[in-house]
Amino acid sequence: MKFNSLTGRFAVLASCAAALGCGLAQAQTTVTEPWVRGTVAQQKATGMFAQITSAKGGRLVSASSSAAGVVEIHEMSMDGNVMRMRALPNGLELPAGKAVALKPGGFHLMLMDLKQPLKAGDTVPVTLVVQAADGSKETVEVKAPVKALNAAPAMDHKH
Ligand SMILES: [Cu+2]
């Protein structure tokens, strides 16, 4: 009987997965093209980038990763000739239905206190927390592949 109930449960899980989201809140936020910049030995911080779209709008309020002690939401911008990076104390606004780009030279997630160097081919699990206008929170699990340090896209010319 025990075996039967176990297989029954597996069958239910499988059909849930196939139907995308039975019993779960409908995902409002989608994350596409996630990636993390690889690091060299001793390097303790790096950036994660992606496209984030919130269907109904919201705010990226926090993030975490098992690969990092701390994850902050950062903005990079030019201040005269100086590139500055700052944490966004209120998180990142996600306008309804509009993709927000986290990219080198702009918004990014800063993975700090890295537990180990990140090499191309690794995958970094990151959990994003998005708060809706009504205060409800949605967590989004992202698996971000690591790209080699020198494999930055052509647009990344600001560093
Ligand atoms: Cu940063």
Image (cartoon, rainbow, N blue to C red):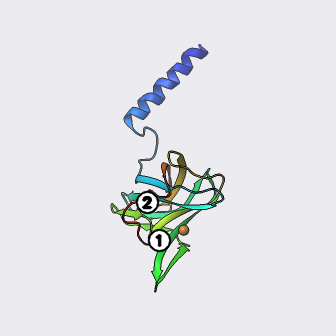
Q: Position of residue 4 (x, y in %)?
A: 54, 15
What residue is shown at x 61% (from left), y 51% (from top)?
67
Which residue is located at x 53 percent, y 71 percent?
A: 90
Per the rendering, the mark at residue 152 is 2
Give neighbour class at mark 2: few <14, some 14-19, many 20+ (Cα, 10 Å).
Answer: few
What residue do we see at 48% from left, 50% from top?
Answer: 144
SS for callout 1: loop
**110 vs 83: above or below:** above
What is the distance, in whole Å, between disc 1 and disc 2 at their CAs? 11 Å
Q: Whole-percent x and y of residue 25?
A: 45, 47
Residue 111 visible from this viewpoint: no
Residue in the image at 46% along x and 43% along y: 24
Q: Is residue 85 visible?
A: yes
Q: Is residue 116 left or right of residue 154?
A: right
- Image coords of residue 38 (percent x, y): 53, 55
Residue 32, relative to residue 14: is it above or below? Answer: below
Front in this rendered view, residue 36 or 142: 36
Circle 1 is placed at which residue position? 159
Image position of 137 (left or right of 100): right
Amino acid beneath label 1: His
Disc count in the image?
Answer: 2
Compared to residue 139, the image places residue 132 above or below, namely below
Badge 1 vs badge 2, beta-carbon distance below 8 Å: yes
**Name of the residue lying farthest toward the top:** 1
Q: In terms of depth relative to the viewer, which is nearer, 99 or 148?
A: 148
Quadrant assignment for ligand 1:
bottom right
In the figure, residue 45 lies in which quadrant? bottom right
Q: Residue furthest bottom?
A: 80
Cβ(mark 1) to ligand 1 < 8 Å? no
